[in-house]
Image (spheres, rainbow, N blue to C red):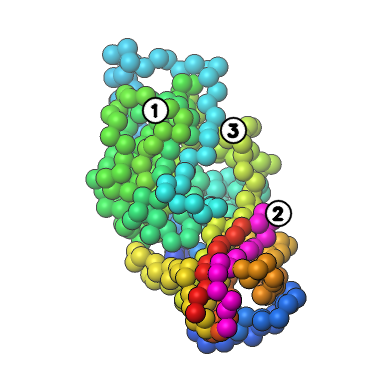
């Protein structure tokens, strides 16, 4: 996930949380990354850090990959022979919409990207993504990452358990192959099969959607049509995986790997596959929370504890947390807590201590918040990268 080789995550720790400040006790209020407090009532402490979801393994073994292609080609030949599949139309030009959508959650965001396609054929440690950065990986076996890894954030296991992030078809097409029934709470390379859907588009290109949750794969059969945006499954961690994420691979009509992102170092194809390509750093706030304690991120595959809470009594502890994706240290977050009457209780600014975090979380807290009120609905506001998001909470005697 890091943008510089010095910060690459070791293979022995594919999933970890880097806590830059203590989550217990008080922490200093002043640091190079806090812009200070422009009102009374500064927080008593802070915490958080970078959350790292890192894939460092081949998503499929070579034999598994051959089996996938054998099944795809066999199914396509059968469908063509039965007259259920038209020959590829070179003028169809498949383009992809975003392949994920939220289901039953209203947070402003739900994902991060850990890896793009690796365009440097050398190995090990020779990385080049489509934007000439190093947000990818390779392995000593000669595997160069072949797709895009989009993981859910924050609380990915919660989201998986509650089916809150769905995988959808980026383009219309025909189901060429599907697999389900495989274990979906994996945390490492184990040579297990994944749950996946493979969609063949009208121009003959094929999109692979992998690591889906067991039992969530669409019930549509091989040969069935799917529309753009149609449900395919739920983000899971089946197969060779270190946490819930979607691995997306795209191939042109000749079976040649493509990179859906267009950029100066994309050596595979000249054009973007996206209908609206997102920026390389898709910086945003994914979630704001108030709570009675910091969130807990246990080891994979244990479910996180968010410790969210929105109703407090005078003098109770309150933790104010912001969860980011693609946070850059050049982007300053502006924080405010506003009383029910519209006056400002506290305001401060904050910058990330590192050049880039694919996902990060930061919290500030009071062990005794507003011991005399006032009662009513308060607002926790954060402005970041031109967008303001609000979390409301209540205080009462």
Image quadrant where one finds the N terminus? bottom right
Q: Depth check: 113 or 47 in front?
A: 47
Q: Which sits earlier in the primary sequence, circle 2 or circle 1?
A: 1
- Dots 2, 3 in contact, CB < 8 A: no
Residue at the spot x=48%, y=58% of the render? 153
Determine crowd level at label 1: few under 14, some 14-19, many 20+ residues with C-alpha closer than 10 A: many
Question: Residue 275 has which mark?
Answer: 3
The answer to whether 102 appears left or right of 239 in the picture is right
Q: Quadrant of residue 355?
A: bottom right
Nearer to us of marks 2 and 3 is: 2
Magenta part, dominant SS: strand
Q: Up-down: is 330 above or below 275?
A: below
Q: Depth check: 145 or 52 in front?
A: 52
Residue at the spot x=33%, y=56% of the render? 161
**Residue under label 2:** 386
- Dots 1, 3 in contact, CB < 8 A: no
Q: Depth check: 197 or 327 in front?
A: 327
Q: So how many labels did they put on this image?
A: 3
Q: Quadrant of residue 33?
A: bottom right
Direction bottom: furthest residue: 25
**Residue under label 1:** 226
Q: Position of residue 304 (x, y in %)?
A: 39, 67
Kindly tell me whether residue 221 is visible in this rendering.
Answer: yes
Q: CA distance from mark 2 to mark 1?
A: 36 Å
* Element type at mark 1: strand
- For the record, the magenta segment spans 372-388
Determine crowd level at label 2: few under 14, some 14-19, many 20+ residues with C-alpha closer than 10 A: few
Residue at the spot x=30%, y=27% of the render? 222
Determine crowd level at label 3: few under 14, some 14-19, many 20+ residues with C-alpha closer than 10 A: few
């Amino acid at each position: 996930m890091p943008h510089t080789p010095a910060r690459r995550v070791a293979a022995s720790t594919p999933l970890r949380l880097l806590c830059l400040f203590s989550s217990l006790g008080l922490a200093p209020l002043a640091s190079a990354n806090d812009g200070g407090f422009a009102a009374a009532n500064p927080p008593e402490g802070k915490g958080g850090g970078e959350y790292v979801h890192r894939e460092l393994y081949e998503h499929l073994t070579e034999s598994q990959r051959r089996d996938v292609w054998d099944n795809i080609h066999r199914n396509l030949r059968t469908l063509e022979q039965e007259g259920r599949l038209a020959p590829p139309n070179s003028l169809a030009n498949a383009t992809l919409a975003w392949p994920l959508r939220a289901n039953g959650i209203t947070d402003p965001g739900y994902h991060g990207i850990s890896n793009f396609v690796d365009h440097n054929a050398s190995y090990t440690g020779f990385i080049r993504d489509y934007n000439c950065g190093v947000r990818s990986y390779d392995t000593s076996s000669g595997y160069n990452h072949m797709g895009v890894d989009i993981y859910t954030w924050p609380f990915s296991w919660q989201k998986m358990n509650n089916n809150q992030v769905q995988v959808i078809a980026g383009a219309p097409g025909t189901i060429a192959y599907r697999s389900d029934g495989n274990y979906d709470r994996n945390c490492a390379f184990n040579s297990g099969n994944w749950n996946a859907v493979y969609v063949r588009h009208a121009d003959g290109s094929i999109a692979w959607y992998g690591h889906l949750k067991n039992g969530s794969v669409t019930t549509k059969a091989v040969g069935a049509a799917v529309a753009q945006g149609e449900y395919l499954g739920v983000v899971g961690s089946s197969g060779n995986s270190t946490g819930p994420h979607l691995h997306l691979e795209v191939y042109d009509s000749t079976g040649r790997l493509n990179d859906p992102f267009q950029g100066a170092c994309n050596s595979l194809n000249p054009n973007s596959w996206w209908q609206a390509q997102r920026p390389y750093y898709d910086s945003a706030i994914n979630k704001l929370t108030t709570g009675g304690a910091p969130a807990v991120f246990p080891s994979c595959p244990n479910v996180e504890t968010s410790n969210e809470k929105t109703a407090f009594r005078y003098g109770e502890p309150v933790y104010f947390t912001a969860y980011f994706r693609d946070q850059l240290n050049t982007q300053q977050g502006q924080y405010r807590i506003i009383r029910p009457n519209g006056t400002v209780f506290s305001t401060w600014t904050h910058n990330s201590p590192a050049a880039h975090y694919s996902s990060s979380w930061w919290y500030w807290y009071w062990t005794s918040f507003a011991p005399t009120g006032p009662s009513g609905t308060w607002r926790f506001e954060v402005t970041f990268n031109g967008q303001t998001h609000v979390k409301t909470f209540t205080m009462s005697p």
